[in-house]
Image: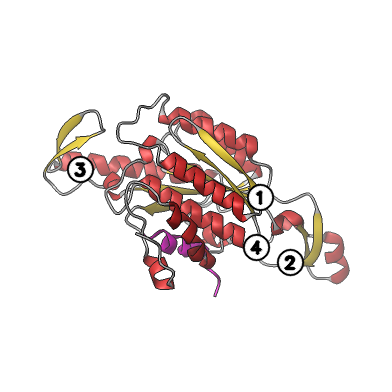
Amino acid sequence: MAVTSTKHNLLEWRPEGAYIELDNLIASRFAAKDLKINQRRKALNLLAGPNKSNFRGRGIDFEEVRAYQAGDDIRSIDWRVTARSGRPYTKLFSEERERPLLVVTDQRQGMFFGSRYCFKSVLACYISSLIAWSALQQGDRVGGLVFGNEEQHEIRPRRSRQSTLALMHLMLEQNHQLKRDTGIGISQQQRLENSMTELRRIARPGTAIFLVSDFNGFENESVQKHLHQLSRHCEITAISIYDPMEKTLPPPGQYTVTDGQQRNQINTADRRLRHLYSSHFEQREQQLKQFFGRLGIPLLEIGTQQAPLEQLLNYYGARR
């Protein structure tokens, strides 16, 4: 299904199927016009939790001084100008006007799953494209990292349409490598760790990072250490992708399930099984929230049954 250009359709549009279509990723630039992806403070204010801020990166080049506005970093206050004028003034740096932004998109085998509309891997690509187009339209330098089962590829941040398109071609390539019977050389956890290692290598201080993943394997100690180090110098936002069937088992009945190699039958009428299944998801969800909360990283959750633009607008909609 192609993305149409009317605002109403863009708001309610949901990606479909097991694989992405490049035309839809490119067409998402029209929907991205309503997003203000740099309004991170609004996103933080809408999320619960005691830790609502972390280090905001800035460029090393001084740009100008202007009157202090609510939400500005108090560490940037120009105390000399403030003392002379009697009113608070803050310093602006060039990075705040044109910052590097990296969109990190998970295309591991665990993302190749979905019970509504589309697979998690497809939704992740579409959300990533919305973020990339929004950032480019607001003057940021856009790049990204796309990682799959066996490899990862990066696009260095640039303020150009070509680099954004190159990022989407990477998404397409990694997405179409996913197959039901794909053999996996290393574990999902190890792949996530390798990708976080690479991310630390390419992310400069002050970079805005959007992690779009189901975060399968985040419990790994090395992964958490990498995220902790990144959060000290970069502005990170985590977007957790899930499918409704991961939260709740299907209606009571006898089902045959397969991972592409083996088949098993489950009886979802078992109340204890249903409770344990839901509790496991809720426990992991709470662990994610607590971990990212300690680092001051906002965690957004978007399901495959939801319209991605509508969900992102809840946090990054234009101010009225």
Work out how far the residue at label 3 is from the one at label 4, CA to CA, in angstroms. 44 Å
Residue 3 percent coordinates (x, y): 40, 63
Q: Residue at x 69, y 67 (%)?
A: 69
Q: Residue at x 27, y 44 (%)?
A: 278
For disc 2, the marked residue is 68
- Secondary structure under the numbered disc 1 in the rendered image: strand
Image quarter where the C terminus lies is: bottom right
Q: Residue at x 45, y 52 (%)?
A: 22
For disc 3, the marked residue is 274
Q: Which mark is drawn over residue 312?
A: none
Work out how far the residue at label 1 is from the one at label 2, CA to CA, in angstroms. 30 Å
Pick whichever, 263 or 2, lies toward us. Answer: 2
Pick whichever, 243 or 222, lies toward us. Answer: 243
**Mark found first going from the N terminus, 1 or 2:** 2
- Secondary structure under the numbered disc 4 in the rendered image: loop
In the rendered image, residue 151 lying in the magenta stretch gets the answer no
Q: Amino acid at mark 2?
A: Tyr
Work out how far the residue at label 2 is from the one at label 3, CA to CA, in angstroms. 53 Å
Image quarter where the N terminus lies is: bottom left
Please give the range of residues in magenta: 307-320
Residue 273 percent coordinates (x, y): 19, 39
- Secondary structure under the numbered disc 3 in the rendered image: helix
Query: Is residue 95 visible in the rendered structure shown here?
Result: yes
**Mark found first going from the N terminus, 2 or 3:** 2
Q: Are marks 2 and 3 in contact (CB under 8 Å)?
A: no
Q: Overall secondary structure of the magenta stretch?
A: helix
For disc 1, the marked residue is 158
Pick whichever, 314 or 6, lies toward us. Answer: 6
Q: Amino acid at mark 3?
A: Arg
